[in-house]
């Protein structure tokens, strides 16, 4: 056993830096005392983590490979990234609340005089390697260094398309607080973020940062960055409230009844940012379809939609076997059914939820049209076997 341990110790330095670090010491002891931690792992609201099994991944791989060759998986023309982002951000929002979707789950929220950056990913790939893994389908709308005046960076969980090591390292020296779910701070410290600038929360814990109240709330997902990860970091949705406004960011989550409870405890919300992409029948518990995303938005306001819903987690990376434009089409269709207010902006286009949102189906100009062409209005998506109601 001693010789085996020495072999393991030689392998530790070879672990890619992007894998991050496992929680240890006081951080690990705090994890072990969490009411959401049992039998060595964090548990979902509905039971054990819904982490894909080896058998499930083996089943998913051929489906992904076949689907990757189908038309529609990627845009056929360049994604129209908004060109006037920085000029608009230089002027404070009239209403006190403005959201700028930078792509995937990355959103800059300007709320009551503060700037909050959710799940910042500026890397070329969501992967531990710079030579493999899903590549960006459009450039970031603005250079990261041009986003000044940040007060808070919020991370939903430690998957590569939400926690990007190059981006965190680029932000590490800024005078900004990093809010993360319990355990995720180990990764950030490993990459150079000072421990005193970490705000690490368990579900239903709150903190005051820069005049804002932020609360980590439950989500239905899982964690992990390396093949041998011990599943000891938490995943979360986030509520951020200021003096006048309140917003919700879902991170990644499957649909579950807890959305209504979150709304009852922390709502109402002026805006929600909700995952609607990268779903599949092969992992139904981990990601929501557009219809489920709109349903979650309604649940957050007691069953009748209120505020504006911004669909996230789509358009930037090809992560699932559904057409690239399907999350946007499906969100518009589901929102019409429930009379929900939504905004589906081009990447980088700032929006104020208090104003009337334009109906701009911009994705149709760059996506492969479905057989028979686009319907007059987004509705049921032809051939969308991955959609669940």
Image (cartoon, grey):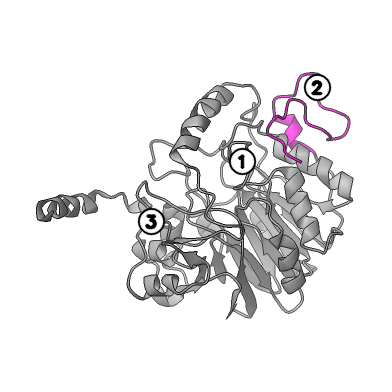
Of residues 348 and 230, the one nearer the viewer is: 230
Q: How crowded is the residue under tag 2: few (<14 C-alpha within 10 Å), some, or many (20+)?
A: few
Of residues 220 and 201, the one nearer the viewer is: 220
Q: Is residue 252 left or right of residue 56?
A: right
Q: Secondary structure at mark 3?
A: loop
From the viewer's perspective, is residue 132 above or below residue 275?
A: above
| Label 2, label 3: how far apart the Cα atoms are | 47 Å
Q: Quadrant of the N terminus?
A: bottom left
- Residue holding disc 1: 278
Q: Which mark is residue 373?
A: 2
Q: Can residue 13 be spotted in the picture? A: yes
- Residue holding disc 3: 230
| Label 1, label 3: how far apart the Cα atoms are | 24 Å
Q: Can residue 91 be spotted in the picture? A: no
Say which quarter of the image contains residue 81. Answer: top right
Question: Residue 38: x, y in percent?
Answer: 47, 64
| For marks 2 and 3 on the same chain, the one whose residue lies earlier in the sequence | 3
Query: Which residue does the image show at 63% across and 32% down from the upper left?
Result: 78
Of residues 21 and 368, the one nearer the viewer is: 21
| Residue 140 among magenta residues | no
Specify start and end residues of the magenta stretch as a single range: 361-389
Question: Residue 147: x, y in percent?
Answer: 56, 60
Query: Which residue does the image show at 53% across and 61% down from the upper left?
Result: 155
């Amino acid at each position: 056993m001693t010789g085996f341990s020495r072999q393991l110790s030689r392998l530790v330095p070879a672990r890619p830096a992007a894998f991050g670090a496992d929680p240890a010491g006081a951080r690990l002891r705090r994890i072990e005392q969490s009411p959401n931690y049992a039998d060595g792992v964090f548990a979902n609201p509905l039971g054990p983590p819904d982490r894909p099994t080896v058998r499930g991944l083996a089943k998913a791989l051929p489906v992904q490979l076949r689907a990757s060759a189908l038309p529609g998986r990627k845009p056929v023309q360049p994604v129209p990234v908004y060109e006037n982002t920085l000029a608009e951000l230089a002027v404070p929002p009239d209403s006190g609340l403005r959201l700028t979707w930078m792509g995937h789950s990355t959103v800059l929220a300007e709320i009551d005089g503060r700037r909050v950056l959710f799940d910042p990913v500026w890397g070329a790939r969501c992967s531990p390697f710079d030579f493999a893994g899903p590549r960006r389908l459009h450039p970031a709308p603005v250079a990261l260094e041009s986003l000044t005046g940040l007060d808070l960076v919020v991370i939903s969980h430690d998957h590569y398309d939400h926690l990007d090591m190059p981006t965190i390292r680029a932000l590490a020296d800024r005078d900004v607080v990093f809010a993360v779910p319990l355990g995720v701070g180990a990764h950030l410290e490993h990459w150079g973020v000072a421990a005193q600038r970490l705000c690490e929360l368990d579900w239903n814990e709150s903190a005051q940062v820069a005049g804002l109240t932020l609360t980590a709330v439950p989500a239905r997902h899982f964690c992990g960055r390396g093949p041998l990860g011990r599943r000891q970091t938490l995943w979360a949705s986030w509520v951020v409230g200021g003096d006048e406004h309140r917003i919700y960011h879902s991170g990644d989550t499957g649909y579950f009844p807890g959305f209504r409870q979150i709304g009852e405890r922390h709502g109402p919300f002026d805006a929600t940012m909700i995952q609607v992409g990268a779903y599949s029948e092969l992992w139904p518990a981990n990601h929501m379809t557009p219809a489920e995303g709109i349903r979650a938005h309604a649940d957050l306001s007691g069953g009748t939609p209120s505020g504006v819903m911004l669909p996230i987690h789509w358009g930037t990376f090809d992560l699932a076997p559904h057409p690239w434009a399907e999350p946007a089409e499906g969100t518009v269709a589901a929102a019409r059914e429930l009379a929900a207010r939504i905004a589906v902006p081009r990447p980088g286009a700032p929006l104020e939820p208090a104003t009337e949102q334009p109906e701009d189906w911009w994705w149709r100009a760059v996506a492969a049209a479905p057989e028979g062409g686009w319907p007059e209005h987004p509705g049921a998506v032809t051939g969308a076997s991955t959609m669940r109601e």
